[in-house]
Amino acid sequence: MIYLHYKGRFPQFERFKSFCEEVVDDIFPNELTFDWSVGIQMRSNLCYGMHQDSGICYYGGTDNIISVELARNYIADLGKKTEHTIPYTMKELCVTLVHEMVHCKQYISGEISSLHNSKKMIEGFPQYWWNDNFGHYDLPWEREAHSYEEVLLDLW
Ligand SMILES: [Zn+2]
């Protein structure tokens, strides 16, 4: 069983919640060996210095609790005088949610790992989720996450 928890201010919260539940039903196998908690947190933005994400998903590796964070806003011209905030549309938020939930599934099935020193290889790639040596779309787990985006958007 996957338990979803929500934190922060979500636009259209009730509808978004049902969407999240349908996405989970679609992505995850019916029978899981263990229960998992997925915390979904809406943040104003996900900026770190000059870098920003629309969503992130991370797992500490031991407690069956996965964290997903979504950015409510995109910061245009980040770090410049003209910096300004542009809210993501509802559809963009949903696409990001789907993408990050696929990463949740990958953590649970062991397809990716948040452990730096993981030696396991997935389709020829070290399974640590981040790898500077490859392009984003080369990584099999990113390709899988992107492949779900448009398909599951129909659930919105
Ligand atoms: Zn990704």
Image (cartoon, grey):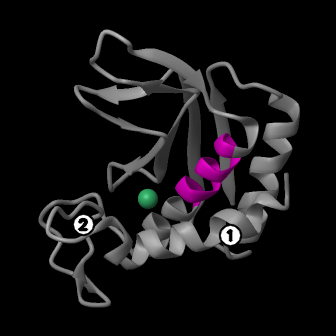
From the viewer's perspective, tell me whether residue 133 is left or right of residue 85.
left
Q: Amino acid at mark 2?
A: Tyr
Residue range of the region highlighted in magenta in the rendering = 92-101
Q: Is residue 123 above or below residue 112?
A: below
Q: Nearer the viewer, residue 63 or 26?
A: 26
Residue located at (24% from left, 29% from top): 50
From the viewer's perspective, tell me whether residue 54 is left or right of residue 30.
left
Q: Amino acid at mark 1?
A: Ile
Would you identify the image quadrant in which residue 125 lies? Answer: bottom left
Disc 2: CA contacts within 10 A as few (<14), some (14-19) or many (>=20): some
Residue located at (15% from left, 78% from top): 119
Circles 1 and 2: CB distance less than 8 Å?
no
Q: How many marks are shown on the rendered structure?
A: 2
Instruction: Determine which of the numbered discs, if any, sits on residue 61 in the image.
Output: none
Q: Secondary structure at mark 1?
A: helix
Question: Do we see residue 41 in this rendering?
Answer: yes
Q: Position of residue 111 (x, y in %)?
A: 40, 76
Q: Nearer the viewer, residue 138 or 104?
A: 138
| Residue at mark 1 to residue at mark 2: CA–CA distance | 21 Å
Image quarter where the N terminus lies is bottom right
97 part of magenta stretch: yes
Q: Position of residue 48 (x, y in %)?
A: 27, 28
Reading the chain from its start, which is encountered first: label 1 or label 2? 1
Q: Nearer the viewer, residue 22 or 146?
A: 146
Q: Position of residue 109 (x, y in %)?
A: 48, 74
For disc 1, the marked residue is 27
Q: Nearer the viewer, residue 47 or 129?
A: 47
Q: Position of residue 24 (x, y in %)?
A: 72, 60
Instruction: Determine which of the numbered discs, if any, sits on residue 128 in the image.
Output: 2
